[in-house]
Image (cartoon, grey):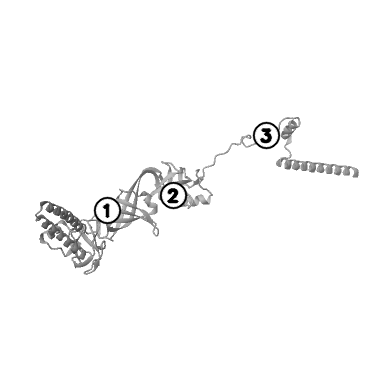
């Protein structure tokens, strides 16, 4: 009986040892297969062929194994219809429509520099009489401004009178030939003296008066070159003046300039000839229409703005220099693909819109933006005309997408 029990125990130990050895061999084979050291029967055939001189098989690739590259899945976030109504989701179609940009800025009325004139003298002398004695006075063209006494001018006139007398005496010579020579020489000198007086702004009427009276004019009268307002008055009673010295600045205010400041980023939209509406608080409810005359070539470094000039008529003189104006320029940008600006989420790096894919699904999509016009923004890439996008509550949709880890795919450049 004891011998039988011993035999049974030995048989059990052998069975357990055999099972353990089988499991151990299986684990070793599995580990070897994973690291590529043992490929089973399928792997032994290429080795045998290589041993018999056949060329080795090329390594397996994804293409050879038939594993095709899967397309990148379009990310979407689901917002059920009832929740859309609850959070106020609205959608709008991206459409091609006319865009109009309105630029509003502030301008200042300034003098029309083309109608600014100065009055000066070409001789040295002293101001003996001042007809216009304060700044801001209105003067007519040809109105006397001041009278200047010049010893040099008086001496030239006296020389002219002496030549005139000599010419008259030459006519009374007994010898006709001598008389003709004297008259010819005197006439040449007389013409030269007249020309000198004309160059000093002595008019032909004044020269005729000198010939008639036989007396020189004591003072030279300075006249206003244009009709307008005296902008600057440097002349003072009794002061000495030199040739070319400015005495008066006179400006014609029948037309004035409006100079407006345009920001640097708006400057590419401004063109000469564009129409603008100009209003003043001085005239409530009244507007002036004008066109862009000139765009100045430099920017102000402090404000990063450029100056744009308009010209408006001012026949009644009610527009005063340095008045402030409101300038509005409406620019037609043509037909462009546009969406509401509130539909675009700007992350600082990318611009995202949520495209309605139907059945409560929204796709985050990166877009490229162009010009902005009031409440619309141009889309140059990322969506097509006719696609519906979320125009309100899109920030709530974006929050839901972020919580679910849904992000827009990067656009291919």
**Left or right of residue 184, residue 284 in this image:** right
**Residue 395 placed where, x, y %?**
46, 52
**Left or right of residue 393, residue 117 in this image:** left
Is label 3 in contact with label 2 (beta carbons under 8 Å)?
no
The mark lying in front, picked from 1 and 2, is: 1
Q: Which residue is mark 2?
A: 344
Within 10 Å of disc 1 (Cα), the crowding (few <14, some 14-19, many 20+) is many
Quadrant of residue 238 within the rendered picture: bottom left
The residue closer to the viewer here, 182 or 340, is: 182
Name which of mark 3 and mark 2 comes first in the sequence. 3
The residue closer to the viewer here, 332 or 393, is: 332
Q: Residue at horizontal 12%, vertical 59%?
A: 165
Q: How many marks?
A: 3
Extreme residue in the front direction: 175
Q: Which residue is mark 3?
A: 58
Q: Which residue is mark 1?
A: 311
Name which of mark 3 and mark 1 comes first in the sequence. 3
Within 10 Å of disc 2 (Cα), the crowding (few <14, some 14-19, many 20+) is many
Q: Secondary structure at mark 2?
A: loop
Q: Secondary structure at mark 3?
A: loop
Alpha carbon of mark 1 to alpha carbon of mark 2: how far? 40 Å
**Residue 257 placed where, x, y %?**
28, 56
Quadrant of residue 320 within the rendered picture: bottom left
**Residue 405 placed where, x, y %?**
54, 49
Q: Secondary structure at mark 1?
A: strand
The mark lying in front, picked from 3 and 2, is: 3
Within 10 Å of disc 3 (Cα), the crowding (few <14, some 14-19, many 20+) is few
Q: Which mark is residue 377?
A: none
Alpha carbon of mark 3 to alpha carbon of mark 1: how far? 82 Å
Name which of mark 1 and mark 2 comes first in the sequence. 1
In the image, residue 124 sits, relative to residue 365, either above or below, namely below
Q: Is residue 134 visible?
A: no
């Amino acid at each position: 009986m004891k011998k039988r029990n011993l035999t049974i125990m030995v048989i059990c130990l052998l069975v357990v040892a055999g099972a353990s050895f089988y499991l151990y061999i299986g684990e070793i084979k599995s580990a070897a297969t994973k690291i590529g050291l043992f490929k089973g029967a399928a792997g032994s055939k290429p080795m045998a062929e290589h041993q018999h001189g056949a060329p080795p098989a090329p390594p397996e690739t994804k293409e050879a194994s038939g594993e095709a590259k899967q397309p990148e899945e379009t990310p979407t976030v689901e917002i059920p219809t009832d929740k859309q109504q609850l959070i106020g989701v609205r959608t709008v179609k991206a459409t091609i429509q006319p865009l109009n940009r309105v630029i509003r800025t502030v301008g200042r009325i300034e003098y029309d520099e083309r109608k600014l004139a100065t009055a000066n003298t070409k001789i040295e002398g002293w101001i003996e009489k001042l007809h216009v004695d304060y700044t801001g006075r209105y003067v007519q063209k040809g109105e006397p401004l001041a009278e200047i006494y010049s010893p040099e001018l008086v001496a030239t006139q006296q020389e002219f009178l002496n030549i005139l007398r000599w010419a008259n005496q030459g006519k009374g010579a007994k010898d006709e030939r001598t008389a003709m020579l004297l008259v010819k020489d005197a006439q040449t000198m007389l013409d030269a003296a007249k020309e000198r007086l004309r160059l000093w702004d002595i008019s032909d009427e004044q020269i005729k008066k000198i010939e008639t009276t036989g007396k020189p004019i004591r003072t030279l009268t300075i006249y206003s070159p244009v009709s307008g307002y005296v902008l600057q008055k440097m002349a003072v009673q009794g002061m000495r003046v030199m040739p070319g010295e400015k005495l008066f600045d006179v400006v014609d205010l029948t037309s004035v300039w409006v100079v407006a400041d345009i920001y640097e980023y708006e400057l590419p939209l401004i063109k000469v000839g564009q129409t603008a509406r100009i209003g003043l608080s001085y005239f409530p409810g009244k507007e002036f229409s004008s066109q862009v005359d000139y765009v100045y070539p430099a920017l102000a470094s402090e404000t990063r703005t450029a100056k744009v000039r308009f010209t408006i008529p001012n026949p009644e003189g009610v527009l005063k220099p340095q008045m402030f104006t409101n300038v509005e320029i409406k620019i037609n940008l043509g037909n462009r693909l546009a969406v509401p600006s509130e539909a675009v989420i700007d992350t600082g790096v990318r611009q995202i819109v949520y495209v309605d894919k139907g059945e409560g699904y929204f796709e985050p999509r990166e877009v490229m933006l162009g010009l902005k016009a009031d409440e619309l923004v141009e889309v140059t890439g990322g969506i097509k005309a006719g696609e519906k996008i979320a125009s309100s509550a899109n920030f709530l949709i974006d929050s839901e997408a972020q919580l679910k880890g849904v992000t827009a795919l990067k656009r291919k450049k």
